[in-house]
Amino acid sequence: MQLALQILVNGLLLGGLYALLAVGLTLIFGVLRVVNFAHAEFMMLGMFGVYWVWHLTGLDPYLAVLVVTPLVLLFGIVCDRLIIQRTIGAPEVTVVFATLGLSIFLQNAALTLWTADIRSVTTAYSGMVLTPFGLRVSVPMLISFTVAMLAAAGLWLVLTRTLYGKAIQAVAQNREAAALMGIDVRRIYLWTFSVAVAAAGAMGGLIAPLFTVYPRVGISYIVTVFVIVVLGGLGSVPGAVLAALLIGLIEAAAGFLFGAAWAELSYFLIFLAVLIARPQGFFGRRGAEVFAGR
């Protein structure tokens, strides 16, 4: 029983970290109808940003997230203006190649600027562990999980409880009708993309104290996050969070029972089984558009 609870805790903590990255990706698709293959590279920039702020100034990495996230948001605005806005309404293959090209560019820019060296962020509490009810919970992991879930909840509240969130939902449902109602569609696209990639940057900053930092780190996350987004239902924020927690649990359990090599295979098999039974994912609707606030 104790072992099962430990696996449950580990899986939920891991899934909570995936959730923030997945929420940003599903938000971009839900509103812009853009599959952002460069999403994990914004996470990588967040990791490097926190690493360099910590390395050069000694600032606590979790406080460094507050410095780095606005910078990633500003960079997201630039990318939206130069790349994403120019692909809106273009053939789907154009969008795919644009974001894929951005991904390759960011990876190679990071390699050029910072080399392929593997770096890590350490703090005085890096090895601290809490033992509630005999369970072992890493303090940095718990902090990262808590902040990630609060950020995801904050995004969901903005989408469902504010006037700007309702405008985002309107654009996601029907951009032409939203424009006729006086909504500045391009402005909605700009801030949706920028906030989503800022969430990815924040997630990168939150995991910098937990995992190693290197230019191609995003590759190890992007496939998992796409699985989460599709499993939860394209465009659904609650679906992305639920699927992220589920994938975290599967990965933790399979990794313990069968070894790390079987973790991805296990959730891919479950992913395929769910899609066969429910192709639209948990919160998606067959044959209908799904807006980001659902």
Image (cartoon, rainbow, N blue to C red):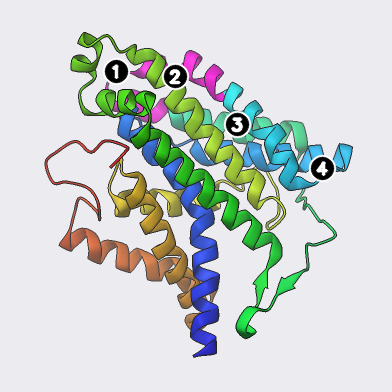
Helix or strand or loop: what does disc 1 sit on? loop
Q: CA distance from mark 2 to mark 1?
A: 17 Å
Helix or strand or loop: what does disc 2 sit on? helix
Q: Amino acid at mark 2?
A: Leu
Residue labelled with disc 3? 106
Q: Amino acid at mark 4?
A: Trp
Magenta residues?
A: 76-98
Residue labelled with disc 1? 90
Q: Amino acid at mark 3?
A: Leu
How far across and how far down the image is residue 93, in percent? 31, 27
Q: Residue at x 25, y 25 (%)?
A: 170
Q: CA distance from mark 3 to mark 4?
A: 22 Å
Q: CA distance from mark 2 to mark 3?
A: 20 Å
Residue labelled with disc 2? 190
Q: Main secondary structure of the magenta part?
A: helix
Kindly identify which numbered label has been placed on residue 54.
Answer: 4
Of residue 98 and residue 53, the one placed in the foreground of this image is 53
Q: The C terminus appears in which quarter of the rendering?
A: top left
Helix or strand or loop: what does disc 3 sit on? helix
Q: Is residue 269 above or below residue 33?
A: below
Q: Is residue 17 above or below residue 252?
A: above
Q: CA distance from mark 2 to mark 4?
A: 30 Å
* Nearer mark to the viewer, of 3 and 4: 4
Mark 4, Cα crowd under 10 Å, few <14 / some 14-19 / many 20+, is: many
Q: Is residue 81 magenta?
A: yes
Residue 276 seen by the camera:
yes
Looking at the image, is mark 1 or mark 4 earlier in the sequence?
4
How far across and how far down the image is residue 87, in percent? 36, 18
Looking at the image, is mark 2 or mark 3 earlier in the sequence?
3
